[in-house]
Image (tube, rainbow, N blue to C red):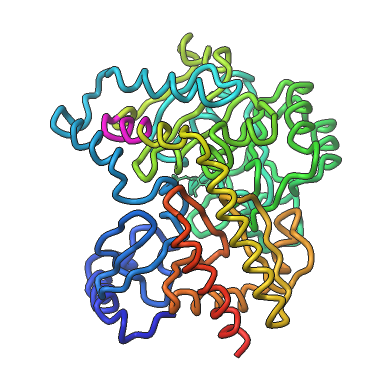
């Protein structure tokens, strides 16, 4: 951790916060990012500046969204212009159409979209559409996958029991009745999926998967796994849903659909879609939304389509569409991955990096990239935590779960800083 002398103002503010703001933070996990939660004064490009005057290169990107950095001139100008014209109308506006058109142009196989605000909400809309479309209730998810904090999907995220098919609640306050229709399987195991479909295929409304298991170790799908999953759904009349809240607009402009060349029935977007503004979407073939048009079900929300979120998403996608953007982000991530493994080898540590250039996870103490949640539990998180503390001391802010995010704001100067930090932090880690 950064020494307490250099974060004393944050420590004071945290104490003050705990008196009136329950837990002191606004999202449970944020308590554990650093020993004392850091209070950010402002952020600019690739850097966070805390209230104690520390400047840190940021590889957390607000847990993913800040793909074009903070204080982005284009987003600022467009949002500022919109703010004088109204925040939210509860009515239609032209920018909604422009954003829908941009997404449809950008993402293979997405013909139509619906908008909401958070990934959690959009996942629920996708599930509801799938249920209305199929007339079935069961949803299938995989171990270690995160699809938001609601009870029907927050199961078997960090399972305690060895039973890989048991839907296990993640926290207190989750009544069994709310996840009674949720089935669970280990990921990356097509035979397990085939067997379940053979037994209960006619009950399953949808299969929900992160296309890269970014929430647990950034595990990559085995070759052919995503294709087989989509095909099995098709055979059994279930809806395939890719949760692209992390991968969407990040691993390619067209997300996993473009990166892997696979088109599920529905995809869910959030995070990078609006560069840090509150925006999510569900996209898919037009026929998938027939259940909304014919009023078999509904999709609603006071803030859906809020003007400045939509405008921010348009500007973010415009920035991401510039030539060379993804190549640069991937090269930056690749250079960091190489620096991590070679600096680790220099001090006698095993380190493996899994994922892709713009979102990856670092695994200490293993020799092979994990393929599913159970594999990830073998990574040595204690050593990573020491490494992360050293990185913070060396001016680089990282997430506690060993996931790194890269954005367009990470330039050569930041790369040089982070590589130096990696080399010296690896030495500190074994000292
Ligand atoms: N799906 C995935 C893959 C996520 O990583 C997250 C959040 O981290 C969500 C859904 C939920 O999104 P939100 O936090 O915007 O509700």
Residue that sits furthest to the left in the current view: 84
Residue 349 in the image, given as x and y percentages of width and height: 71, 78
Q: Using the image, determine if residue 213 lies above or below residue 85.
A: below
Residue at 42% over, 77% down: 35
Residue at 62% over, 42% down: 210
Question: In the picture, which quadrant includes the N terminus?
Answer: bottom left
In this rendering, position of residue 313 left or right of residue 340:
left
Q: Quadrant of residue 109?
A: top right
Q: Using the image, determine if residue 74 lies above or below residue 58.
A: above
In this rendering, position of residue 239 left or right of residue 55:
right
In this rendering, position of residue 49 left or right of residue 132:
left
Q: Quadrant of residue 137?
A: top right
Is residue 309 visible in the rendered image? The answer is yes
Identify which residue, 90 or 322, lies in the foreground: 322
Q: Is residue 278 magenta?
A: no
Q: Quadrant of residue 332?
A: bottom right
Residue at 50% over, 66% down: 416
Identify which residue, 311 or 204, lies in the foreground: 311
Residue that sits furthest to the bottom in the current view: 431
Q: Using the image, determine if residue 429 lies above or below residue 246.
A: below
Question: In the picture, which quadrant includes the C terminus?
Answer: bottom right
Is residue 178 visible in the rendered image? The answer is no
Residue 185 in the image, given as x and y percentages of width and height: 74, 46
Residue 96 in the image, given as x and y percentages of width and height: 34, 22
Q: Which residues are magenta?
A: 306-314
Q: Is residue 307 magenta?
A: yes
Q: Main secondary structure of the magenta part?
A: helix
Residue 160 in the image, given as x and y percentages of width and height: 67, 63
């Amino acid at each position: 951790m950064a020494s307490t002398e250099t974060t004393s103002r944050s420590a004071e503010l945290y104490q003050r916060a705990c008196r009136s703001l329950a837990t002191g933070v606004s999202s449970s996990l944020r308590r554990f990012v650093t020993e004392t939660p850091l209070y950010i004064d402002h952020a600019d490009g690739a850097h966070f500046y805390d209230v104690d005057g520390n400047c840190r290169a940021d590889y957390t990107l607000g847990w993913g969204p800040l793909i074009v950095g903070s204080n982005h001139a284009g987003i600022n100008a467009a949002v500022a212009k919109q703010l004088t014209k109204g925040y939210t109308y509860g009515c239609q506006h032209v920018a909604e159409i422009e954003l829908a058109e941009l997404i449809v142009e950008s993402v293979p196989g997405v013909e139509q979209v619906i908008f909401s605000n958070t990934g959690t909400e959009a996942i629920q809309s996708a599930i509801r559409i799938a249920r209305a479309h199929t007339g079935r209730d069961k949803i299938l998810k995989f171990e270690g996958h995160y699809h938001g904090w609601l009870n029907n999907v927050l199961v078997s995220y960090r399972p305690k029991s060895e039973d890989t098919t048991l839907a296990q609640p993640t926290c207190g306050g989750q009544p069994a009745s709310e996840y009674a229709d949720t089935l669970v399987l280990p990921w990356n195991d097509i035979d397990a999926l085939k067997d379940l479909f053979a037994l209960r295929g006619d009950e399953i409304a949808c299969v929900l998967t992160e296309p890269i298991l970014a929430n647990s170790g950034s595990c990559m799908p085995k070759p052919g796994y995503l294709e087989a999953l989509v095909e099995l759904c098709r055979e059994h009349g279930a809806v395939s849903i890719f949760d692209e809240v992390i991968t969407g607009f990040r691993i390619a402009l067209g997300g996993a659909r473009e990166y892997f060349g696979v088109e599920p029935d529905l995809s869910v977007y959030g995070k990078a879609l609006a560069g840090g503004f509150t925006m999510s979407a569900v996209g898919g073939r037009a026929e998938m939304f027939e259940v909304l048009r014919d009023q078999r079900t509904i999709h609603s929300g006071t803030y859906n389509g809020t003007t400045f979120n939509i405008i921010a998403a348009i500007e973010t996608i415009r920035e991401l569409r510039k030539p060379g953007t993804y190549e640069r982000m991937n090269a930056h991530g690749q250079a960091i991955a190489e620096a991590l493994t070679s600096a680790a080898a220099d001090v006698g540590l095993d380190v493996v990096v899994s994922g892709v250039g713009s979102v990856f996870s670092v695994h200490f103490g293993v020799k092979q990239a994990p393929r599913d949640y159970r594999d990830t539990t073998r990574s040595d998180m204690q050593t990573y935590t020491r490494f992360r503390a050293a990185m913070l001391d060396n001016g680089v802010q990282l997430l506690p779960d060993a996931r790194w995010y890269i954005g367009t704001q990470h330039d050569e100067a930041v790369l040089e800083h982070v590589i130096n930090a990696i080399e010296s932090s690896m030495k500190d880690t074994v000292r």
